[in-house]
Amino acid sequence: MTRPPRRHLRRALAAALPVPVIGLVLLVTSGNLLLPMRPVVTIEAKMASKRDFFQDPEVERLLMKHGFRVHITNMGSREIAKQDYSGYDVVFPSGQPAADLISRERARANRPVLLYRPFVSPIVLATYRDYAEVLAAEGVAERLPGSGSPPMYYTLDMRKFLDLALGKRKGVQRDPENGYRWDEIDDKNHVRNGNKILAQTSDICESNSAGTYLGLVAFVEHGNDAPDNEAEAERLARRIKPLLVEQGLPSSERAETYLSPDGQGIAPISVIYEHQFLAHQLQHKARKGETDDERVLLYPSTRFVTEPQLVALTGDGARLGELVSEDSELQHRAMELGFRARSTGSGASSDDLTRFLTERRIPVPTTSSDDTRAVLPSLPLLEKMIEIVGDCPDRNGNP
């Protein structure tokens, strides 16, 4: 008598048995019943833009394999640092200033924290090809070598870019209150936009990217140096305030707006993180077989690399921090999402992202080692400048 195939037996059992028994049969036949049942720990977390990583379905699956589920409360980095975070296991602002604020407050309360840096992502200025080419024709931007054809990446001369916003063009200064607009410098009529030439940020009172861009602008405007006293910082903040107007989107929405079909009409240049752009290009290539050549990046010649720090407030939070920093599968997935994963123990970004992009025929962003590295003001001075530029409310909601 011929024995029926095993798959037919499973189908027959499935038709005859109730659902709980079906699950038991499938566990037995797959061998998973022999594995120990791992308890699942729910991590309560406050996160800014780096929630992109934790909300990825593959990351969720890998975390669940290790017994973690992460429940995220979404808010801007500075908002995370300014609000109460009792009852949370981790907070993950997108940059070091907010993490430093949290660490200092916890230290004053004699409640130290553990910090983890699983990956890095530079601040970039995201724009559209026509605007990048207008800036290139003006001598403000330059196509990066090896960035594809047509180029996907440009270097932006921050001094010349800010000069346009302050009414200075090709050595001629007009009223600084009357900065140039796009249609005034577009000699070939590539863009029809009468808006001021500015890089738009998220809400500066909440967002790390906005606060970092403020620090970058301040550094350039202060002769490539950070202010070192309160009076100097206050004067500088009031001087650069016009360069950071017309802002205010929540931090989560700046990249979403840039990547939306109507983004070009809303903001020609947006301050976002590199991983958000690279993740979009990887998804676009996988979906359509080609890169999105309409959207490009401007890398400021004066650079500042953000180092997001996962702040562990509890033992479970520390276990999560160790896992995402050291687990090879999670680090690899971070790279697939456009992050520059840090090499364990070295403190430096690995070359894995370069190889990964090259294999998928996506141009690799390479910045010059000659670029100036910006230095942010000290934490108290940066906080004072943010409050002045953003007219930020205090903890009680008062302006």
Image (cartoon, rainbow, N blue to C red):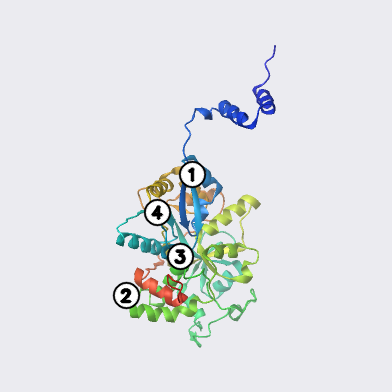
| Residue holding disc 4 | 117
Compared across the picture, whether 224 is left or right of 121 comes to: left
Q: Secondary structure at mark 2?
A: loop
Q: Is residue 192 visible?
A: yes
Instruction: Pick the residue in front: 74 or 56.
Output: 74
Q: Which mark is residue 63?
A: 1
From the top left corner, tell me how far across and down residue 123 is, in percent: 47, 64
Residue type, label 3:
Glu
Q: Quadrant of residue 290?
A: bottom right
Q: Residue at x 57, y 53 (%)?
A: 282
For the residues labelled 4 and 3, the Cα–Cα distance comes to 20 Å
Image mark count: 4
Q: Mark 1 or mark 3, which has the lower sequence index?
A: 1
Q: CA distance from mark 1 to mark 4?
A: 17 Å
- Please name the amino acid that badge 1 sits on: Leu
Q: Which image quadrant for residue 260?
A: bottom right
The image shows residue 191 at horizontal and vertical percentages of: 64, 74
Residue type highlighted by circle 2: Asp
**In front of the other: 39 or 176:** 39
* Residue 228 disc label: 2
Q: Residues within 10 Å of mark 3 (few under 14, many from 20)?
A: many
Q: Earlier in the sequence, mark 1 or mark 4?
A: 1
